[in-house]
Amino acid sequence: MTLTLSKKMAEFTSRLETPQNNYQQAAAERLENMDFPSTRDEYWKYTRLGKITNTAFELGTKLTKTDISSFQTCDNIITIAQGEIRDDLSSFNDLSIVVERSFPGQFGVNNVRNEEKATIFTTINDAYFREEVVITIPKNTVLSAPLQVLVLHEGDQIINMPRLRVVAEGSSEATIIMTTGCQDNYTQFSNCLIELDVAANAKLTFQNVQTGNDNHLTITTIDARQAADSRLAVNTFTLNGLLVRNNVNIAVDGQNCETHMNGMLVTKGKQHVDNHTFVDHKVSNCFSNENYKYVLDDQSTGVFNGKVIVRKDAQVINAYQNNGNILLSDQASVDSKPELEIYADDVKCSHGSTTGQLDENALFYLQTRGISKEKSEKILVGAFIGDVMETIEDEATNQYIKNHLQEVHGWDSDIEI
């Protein structure tokens, strides 16, 4: 197969194996008409992709390090290493779930995502992923414990295409905790695609814990669909990574749905974290709430763009957005753009964004009690992000995040969050 790609795309894919099955060949051919976005594109206005697009990555091979103890927070775990499931590093027999693998050759050429949902990065994933992991929570099943999905990376200039689909069947209930782990500190790119299908009366909580490493590059796309009477929570915690972009798209297709999206990030150095969310209220009598808290230090930058659409026939909708930002350094910056697009009359919708520094009076009060300025700052930050941290009900995962704040950001272990 000979492709006519843009110069940038040809360089980016130069070390990637040419797909041999019809599904991926079709995806690779679609790349002929696509190119990487620039800051001239509104959707990427504040995020420069040069760290990704200027590197020729190759697909990762087998791990040389297989000790996952420092990453594991749950007894039940599925490990995806270098884009493929590792049975020897997985254990989920205690849960009543079905785990399957789908390989690219099993996908039909017409089995492609809606063209409106396709992006340059989901198309690259289509073209080069190795396998899709499908987790099904059967009808009427309530998982007694959370399931961890550990996504491992290793090697220099490696690209991985993790691909996960979670199907929560009718009246089921589950918590999935996805954790990113890097076995070294080399430059790696994770182009991750996740699909969540929440059936009628099902409840699904999806926790995305991004720890990565100082050189990790991440584009994560979550596409979710909710049926009637369902509850979905997607919570994102970004604690490390040189460049992180999270796209969370939720289609609310049934009445009486509840949708929650929470996010928390703590940055340092020259890290850049960009969260784009999109909630599409298509029908009546639904509720959605977003709460994202940013803490940025040094020369780091953050972006929040949250959009909610209420369609013409979607009456009696309550939709709320909040983005709060604290800048710990004069050189840190954030661009915040919450959006509401409302075509119905009977709605209660609001959005808000605040950016500032820590309260000087509160800092002074803590210091008069003998607490150092540095620790006083972290105590106030802990209180600021506390409501997002409370969405993690699993104690081991909560402690994992606290340990990472201690290791990467110098937090004391006794600071409450």
Image (spheres, helix red, strand yellow):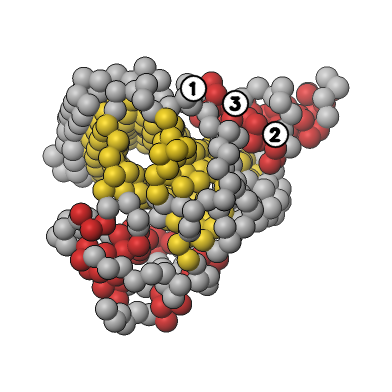
Q: Which mark is residue 399?
A: 3
Residue 148, x across and y down, in percent:
44, 32
Dot 1 crowding, Cα within 10 Å, few <14, some 14–19, many 20+: some
Could one spot residue 293 in this view of the protein? no
Callout 3 touching callout 1 (CB < 8 Å): no
382 to the left or right of 388: right
Can you tell which quarter of the image residue 165 is in?
Answer: top left
Image position of 148 with respect to 245: above or below = above
Residue sitting at x 52%, y 28%? 73
Q: Secondary structure at mark 3?
A: helix
Residue sitting at x 59%, y 26%? 399
Q: Which mark is residue 220?
A: none
378 to the left or right of 156: right
Q: CA distance from mark 2 to mark 1?
A: 19 Å
Going by the numbered disc 1, the residue's amino acid type is Asp
Residue 63, x across and y down, in percent:
53, 50
Residue 294, x across and y down, in percent:
56, 41
> Which residue in the structure is indicated by mark 1?
394
Q: Secondary structure at mark 1?
A: loop
